[in-house]
Amino acid sequence: MDGYRYEEENAVCLVSSDEDTGMRIPTQVQSIVEGSGAVTVSKLKPVPDVDYLQELLAIQQQGPRSIGFFGTRNMGFMHQELIEILSYALVITKNHIFTSGASGTNAAVIRGALRAEKPELLTVILPQSLKKQPPESQELLEKILLKIHDQFLVTKEAMLLAHFAQAVTCSVLMLRVTDGILLVNH
């Protein structure tokens, strides 16, 4: 009898009212518009800052290295400030910084390295000639020595070449991803 009551309690629990369980069954319209909810996309959990700091300490403890920065042109002011500070810190610890282009991530890297007053530790690999860069970038780029790739390539092909040259040259690559910076040792 208790077993029957237990099953009955389970059955009652399965079909209890919305108020009791806190769950709501979606309407047909909600199911069509929002989906069934059977597929849930888990958000990537950001890596704790401690992991980034440990990686940076490992870079610093191994002595000066060649470090390449890859990133996006479209980024917020705060991210640019953080990358500029990171670039500055890496240059004053005698690391050689490589970047390509002169906007977004790359501009922040250049500003940080120039602020460290050691332009000899900064190499910018331009995908195209200086004249093909945006006017706001040209002023920044004129302050440093440049390696310019084939000026006759279209932008996409030229960027791939510049990124490849940068990746081959550097022992550590810093890739800007949506939730932080990914360090790649190779």
Image (tube, grey):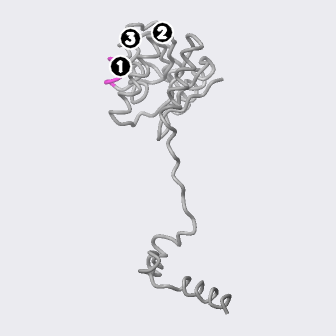
Q: Indicate which disc residue 114 carries.
A: none
Percent across and percent down for residue 138 are 35, 19
Q: CA distance from mark 2 to mark 1?
A: 19 Å
Residue 141 location, quadrant: top left
Horizontally, is 85 left or right of 66 in the view?
left
Percent across and percent down for residue 72 are 45, 34
Graded by Cα atoms within 10 Å as few (under 14), some (14 to 19) or many (20 or more), the crowding at tag 2 reads some
State which tag comes first along the sequence, 1 or 3: 3
Percent across and percent down for residue 13 are 54, 83
Horizontally, is 88 left or right of 3 in the view?
left
Q: How many marks?
A: 3
Horizontally, is 184 left or right of 53 in the view?
right
Q: Indicate which disc residue 116 carries.
A: 3
Start and end of the magenta stretch?
Answer: 135-140
Q: Amino acid at mark 1?
A: Gln
Q: CA distance from mark 1 to mark 3?
A: 20 Å
The secondary structure type at the circle numbered 1 is: helix
Graded by Cα atoms within 10 Å as few (under 14), some (14 to 19) or many (20 or more), the crowding at tag 3 reads some
Q: Which of the pair 43/23 is nearer the observer?
A: 23
Q: Quadrant of the C terminus?
A: top right
Residue corresponding to mark 1: 138
Residue located at (55% from left, 87% from top): 12
Q: Which of the pair 186/167 is nearer the observer?
A: 186
State which tag comes first along the sequence, 3 or 2: 3
Percent across and percent down for residue 112 are 38, 18
Q: Are marks 2 and 1 in contact (CB under 8 Å)?
A: no
Residue located at (39% from left, 20% from top): 131
Among all residues in the image, which is located at the extreme bottom? 1
